[in-house]
Image (spheres, rainbow, N blue to C red):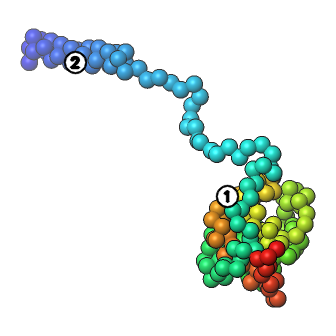
Amino acid sequence: MDSFELNKILGAILATCLLLLVTSFTAGALFAPEMPAKPGYEIAVKDAGHGGKAAAAAPAEPIEKLLQTASVEKGAAAAKKCAACHTFEKGGPNRVGPNLFGVVERARASEAGFNYSAAMKAKGGKWDFQELNAFLLNPKANVPGTAMGFAGIAKDSERADVIDYLRSLADKPVPRPTASK
């Protein structure tokens, strides 16, 4: 191969590189990306408002009325999502959350061997039907600072079913409250 052929090949390679370089600069100038002020994605969250009492919206119907039509079977099915953190059998172990056997009318933060959050210990009282209803509606609003990461059960009938199921988990279940309360 003579030097003229070699010059043509090297010239073609050089011209291709120059064309790619010019194209890259032109594309960069035309399609310059705008960098965000803060890197990352913004996640939209509902504003819970300030002050725990205002954020804890009252349920639509009283729990006494809802419990009259509640189903233990539906509650057991709905409570399966709770089984990731809680156990339900008598003498069952504590997991991420305490064992829930006999929780209705039990003193709050009293399950032996479970380390409750300071907010739950400070709340005091007992787990009656109204307290369970308010807590299961929105745990973070009912007990600000609780370690429970569950978002709550928004549907009144499902919440009543779960509370009725929890009521049935006892050696001697607490009777359902009357709707006249």
Residue at 74% across, 68% down:
62
**Left or right of residue 129, residue 110 in this image:** right
How many numbered tags mark residues here?
2
Q: Which one is earlier in the sequence, the residue at label 2 or at label 1?
A: 2
Q: Are marks 2 and 1 in contact (CB under 8 Å)?
A: no
Q: Position of residue 30 (x, y in %)?
A: 35, 17
Q: Position of residue 168 (x, y in %)?
A: 74, 84
Q: Which mark is residue 151?
A: 1
Q: Position of residue 12 (x, y in %)?
A: 17, 16
Q: Position of residue 28 (x, y in %)?
A: 37, 18
Quadrant for residue 21, please give it. top left
Q: Closer to the camera, 115 or 22?
A: 115
Quadrant in which the N terminus appears = top left
Q: Closer to the camera, 94 or 119?
A: 119
Whether residue 5 is situated above or below residue 122 in the rendered picture: above
Residue type at mark 1 is: Ala
